[in-house]
Image: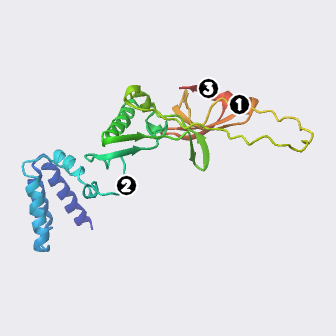
Amino acid sequence: MVDRLKDFIKLLNSLIEIKEEPVSEIIKEIVELTGYAENLAEERIQNIAELMASGEGVKLNEFLDRVSLFTKLDDTVESDKVSLMTFHTAKGLEFSVVFITGLEEGLLPYFKAFDNEEELEEERRLFYVGMTRAKNHLYLTGAKKRRVFSKLQDQEPSRFLFSIPKECCRWVEKAICKHYQPTQAQPKPAAKKPATPTFKVPYKTGCRVRHPKWGVGVVRDCYGEGDDIKVCVNFPGVGIKRLALKFAHLEKV
């Protein structure tokens, strides 16, 4: 077992030494060092030869970037079916109509990117990749309320939406309409009970706050009243923290 492990490490070191060579040479070296082609059918050997030919004079990084753009979805783009995919999968593809969903703070951009400018810009770049997949029509959608961890919470629109010039899009917001029934004679109501006092929580679910120790997080819940208000915050890299508001020293971002 030890000897096999040593041989495997030796093989990896040999391949590391030629990583700057053209892809065709790397594949050839892998085949020779591993003996991979010794028991293959002629058809499979031909496939390897074609792979080597496609990597002739091409560096490994460039070859991997090129290969990553080809997926099984390439064969179905022109069909009359709906394609459901991630931003990464959509690279290199185009569609007549594109829907991008979940444009809400915490989803896009993802809440773990809030406190890192580099990750935030990567989220913005992915959003741009998704937008540019549309040839004719692009629909950007988000929800005002979303069920997260079995709890319905308010959502804020993605900051990326506000970077789009108003003259380049049409903003449609769903309005909540109250439907009234025609006035009818009603029985005499019973005596009213004293109204139960209501308390307004200082932080809405989904808003961003900053903690002096854990940085920026997303509020997942806020409850209680008076000096007993508790707030539940999800901090990237730290996790969910349940804090007493009067001791938390939080500020809205």
Q: Which mark is residue 249?
A: 3
Tell me which numbered mark, 2 or 3, is placed earlier along the sequence.
2
Few, some or many residues within 10 Å of mark 2 (<14, 14–19, 20+): few
Q: Please say which color scheme the image uses.
A: rainbow
Front: mark 2 or 3: 2
Residues under numbered marks 2 and 1 in contact, where contact means CB atoms less than 8 Å apart: no
Tell me which numbered mark, 3 or 1, is placed earlier along the sequence.
1
Q: Position of residue 81 (x, y in %)?
A: 35, 57
Q: Nearer the viewer, residue 223 or 135?
A: 135
SS at mark 2?
loop
Residue at position x 34%, y 39% in the image: 131
Q: Nearer the viewer, residue 153 or 238?
A: 153
Residue at position x 15%, y 67% in the image: 36
Residue at position x 35%, y 54% in the image: 83
| Amino acid type shown at disc 1 | Lys
Residue occupied by mark 1: 200
| Amino acid type shown at disc 2 | Val
Residue occupied by mark 2: 82
